[in-house]
Amino acid sequence: MDREKIEFHIRGLLEAIGEDPDREGLRETPARVAGMLEEVLEGTAYSNHEIAQMFGKTFSAPENGSDEAIVMKDITVFSYCEHHMALMYDMTVNVSYIPRGKVLGLSKIARICDMAAKRLQLQEKLGRDIAEIISEAAGTPDVGVRILGSHSCMTARGIKNTSSRTETRTYLGEYKTRQDLKDLLA
């Protein structure tokens, strides 16, 4: 990311909304916003393939039960909507996959979700990205992802419907056709 350019534009944004970027409370705001954007949009610097490689630590799957689904629920993430750059918050991600000879370390699943969320995007795309990354990292075509979240573009502006939540589901492989696997994500 180009911190200098971000700082320049944040200063201009402050001026455009009628603020004085040189007043005491705002003097360092452009630098703080640039630092914040580097942190919360870190995933922008990586492709899905690169994230799969970063967090692709696997272990041999147990011989008995190696075709049984692994489910991890209530992984918390936040992201930013690409339409309004508004916060998508109180997001929980449920991930399930069927191992094919190897399993991911559990913390890696949460790290994949977190890094994929650190991009400007749509919730639907986030689910697809997580599923693709898990598929590559775990070496399986069978992945399901459910995301439930609030969007400040719905809750804090526009319609201001504070109780609205958005749910998306992404299914790859066996998850597309098997209801028993889809049910694991509920």
Image (spheres, helix red, strand yellow):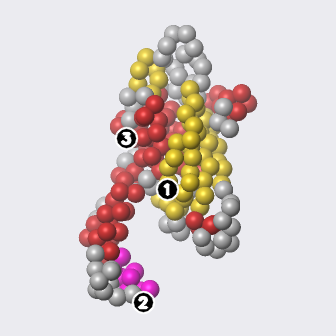
Number of marks drawn: 3
* 3 or 2: tag closer to the N-terminus: 2
Q: Are marks 1 and 3 in contact (CB under 8 Å)?
A: no
- Which residue is denoted by mark 2 in the rendering? 18
Most extreme residue toward the right is: 179
69 sits left or right of 19 in the view: right
Badge 3 amino acid: Glu
Q: Residues within 10 Å of mark 1 (few under 14, many from 20)?
A: many
Q: Quadrant of residue 88?
A: bottom right
Asked whether 18 or 48 is in front, the reply is 18
Residue at the top extreme? Answer: 64
**Quadrant, the N terminus:** bottom left
Res 79 label? 1
Q: Position of residue 102 (x, y in %)?
A: 46, 20
Task: Looking at the picture, tell me which residue is in the foreground, 101 or 110.
Answer: 110
User: Compared to 51, does 119 lie above or below?
Assistant: below
- Magenta segment's dominant SS is helix
**Mark with earlier residue (2, 1):** 2
According to the picture, the residue beneath numbered tag 3 turns out to be: 50
Disc 1 element: strand
Residue 125, relative to residue 60: is it above or below? below
**Residue 169, position as x, y percentages in the image:** 64, 43
Residue 84 picture location, percent across and down: 53, 69
Toward which corner of the image does residue 151 lie, by quadrant? bottom right
Residue type, numbered disc 1: Ser
The answer to whether residue 7 of the structure is visible from this angle is no
x%, y% of residue 18? 42, 89
- Residue 7 against residue 101 in the figure, above or below: below
* Magenta residue span: 9-17
